[in-house]
Image: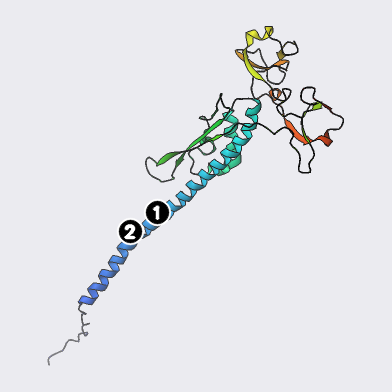
């Protein structure tokens, strides 16, 4: 007898048609588009975030610089020298050290510079220049960076007008923290210190308006002075530092009714 070998039925092969090839091509193209499109979309979103952060930090610096400059203008009305280090510190404080340290400003709070700022000796006008360098946090060699600058001018602060009245119509006068008299004129020479720099070697031969000698300031002269020192026409001390509190007058505008017991200044009160 002839033996027959059992064999499993063969699975019929499916032929790939034109429609199937199109479907495979579409899937491949979608994969390629996603591979390029998603990173480009994410990069575009990241660029938008950086642009918003750049505008935010520019606005913060400009706003802080204007407020710090207004405060510095009051100081220059007494001492006609702009303290750029204090201006720089005030700007950092107004923006916030933590905010700057986590921003795109290179160096954080140490990246802010006001070294180009000065006071015009002729007009007293303040020229403020604040610069910093921004750096994008891109993980590549040579991170892209650029310098931004905020510059503006501020007119000299001339104080309050004489004869100013309060909201309720009362007369306004001016007093200092340690003064014993009130002043009707904000520009009174007793309120405005005429600060000038002189050679220390000349100090022994100089006299103030009352004919008195100048002695070392207990607040800012800790060792023998060298070079130039600062004096006023009405004071009796010489100073090593322009920022010494002995060279400043904190002036308050108050109502005349609030200065009972105080006499009027002999120079500006009539």
Determine the secondary structure under disc 1. helix
Q: Which residue is drawn at 81% across and 35% down?
A: 256
Choose the circle earlier in sequence order: 2 or 1: 2
- Residue 207, compared with residue 15, is above or below; it is above
Residue 48 place in picture, x, y as percent: 44, 53
> Which residue lies under the disc numbered 1?
43
**Marks 2 and 1, how far apart at CA:** 11 Å
Residue 36 is left or right of residue 134, and the answer is left
Placement of 218 over or under 133, stated as above or below: above
Residue 98 percent across, percent down from the top left: 57, 43
Relative to 92, does residue 268 appear above or below in the rendering?
above
Colouring rule applied to residues? rainbow
Q: In this orientation, which residue lies closer to the viewer: 101 or 189?
A: 189
Q: In which quarter of the image is residue 67?
A: top right
Instruction: Please state if 38 lies on the left or on the right of 198 as rendered.
Output: left
Residue of label 2: 36
* Quarter residue 62 falls in: top right
Kind of element beneath mark 2: helix
Task: Check the image and name the residue furthest to the left.
Answer: 2
Out of 5 and 80, give the one closest to the viewer: 80
């Amino acid at each position: 007898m002839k033996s027959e070998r059992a064999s499993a039925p063969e699975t019929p092969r499916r032929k790939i048609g034109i429609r199937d090839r199109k479907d495979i091509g579409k899937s491949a193209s979608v994969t390629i588009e996603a591979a390029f499109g998603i990173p480009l979309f994410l990069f575009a979103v990241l660029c938008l975030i950086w642009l918003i952060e750049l505008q935010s930090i520019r606005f913060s610096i400009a706003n802080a610089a204007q407020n710090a400059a207004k405060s510095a203008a009051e100081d220059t009305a007494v001492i006609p020298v702009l303290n750029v280090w204090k201006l720089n510190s005030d700007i950092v404080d107004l923006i916030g050290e933590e905010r700057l340290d986590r921003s795109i400003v290179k160096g954080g709070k140490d990246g802010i510079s006001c070294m180009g700022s000065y006071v015009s000796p002729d007009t007293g006008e303040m020229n403020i220049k604040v610069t910093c360098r921004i750096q994008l946090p891109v993980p590549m060699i040579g991170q892209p960076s650029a310098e931004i600058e905020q510059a503006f001018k501020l007119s000299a602060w001339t104080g309050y007008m004489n004869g100013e009245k309060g909201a309720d119509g009362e007369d306004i006068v001016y007093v200092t923290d340690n003064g014993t008299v009130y002043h009707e004129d904000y520009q009174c020479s007793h309120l405005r210190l005429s600060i000038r720099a002189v050679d220390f070697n000349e100090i022994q031969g100089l006299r103030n308006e009352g004919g008195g000698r100048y002695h070392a300031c207990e607040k800012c002269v800790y060792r023998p002075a060298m070079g130039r020192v600062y004096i006023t026409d009405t004071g009796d001390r010489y100073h090593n530092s322009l920022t010494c509190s002995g060279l400043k007058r904190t002036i308050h505008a108050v109502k005349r009714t609030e200065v009972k017991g105080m006499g009027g200044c002999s120079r500006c009160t009539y």
